[in-house]
Amino acid sequence: MSNQSGSYLAVIKVVGIGGGGANAVSRMVEAGMSGVEFVAVNTDAQALLMTEADVKIHIGSQAT
């Protein structure tokens, strides 16, 4: 992605893994960080429902 001057803009994504990572992502969202896409990854589907992340990825549903 480039702007009109030909320079490239950074694409920033923050990925929180597990309960602690998802909590950190939620705090960043609540703090109002902008220009960042937030992703939460967790095996706990209920915990994912509580996070403020833009993207929520449930993994390991067969393992836990």
Image (cartoon, rainbow, N blue to C red):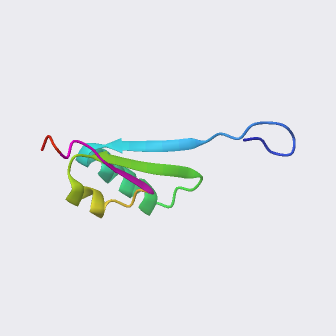
Up-down relation of residue 44 to residue 49 (above or below) = above
Furthest residue toward top: 7
> Residue 14 location, x and y as percent?
46, 43
Q: In which quadrant of the rendered image does the N terminus lie?
A: top right
**Which residue is nearer to you in this view: 31 or 55?**
55
> Residue 57 location, x and y as percent?
34, 49
Residue 56 within the magenta-colored segment of the rendering: yes
**Residue at left 87%, top 41%?**
5
Furthest residue toward right: 5
Magenta span of residues: 54-61
| Residue 16, quarter of the rendered image | top left
**Which residue is nearer to you in this view: 63 or 16?**
63
Furthest residue toward left: 64
Residue 7 within the magenta-colored segment of the rendering: no
Up-down relation of residue 18 to residue 35 (above or below) = above
> Residue 44 location, x and y as percent?
20, 51
Instruction: Classify residue 5 as left or right of residue 35.
Output: right
**Residue at left 40%, top 56%?**
53
**Residue at left 19%, top 47%?**
61
Instruction: Classify residue 46 as left or right of residue 25.
Output: left
**Residue at left 33%, top 59%?**
51
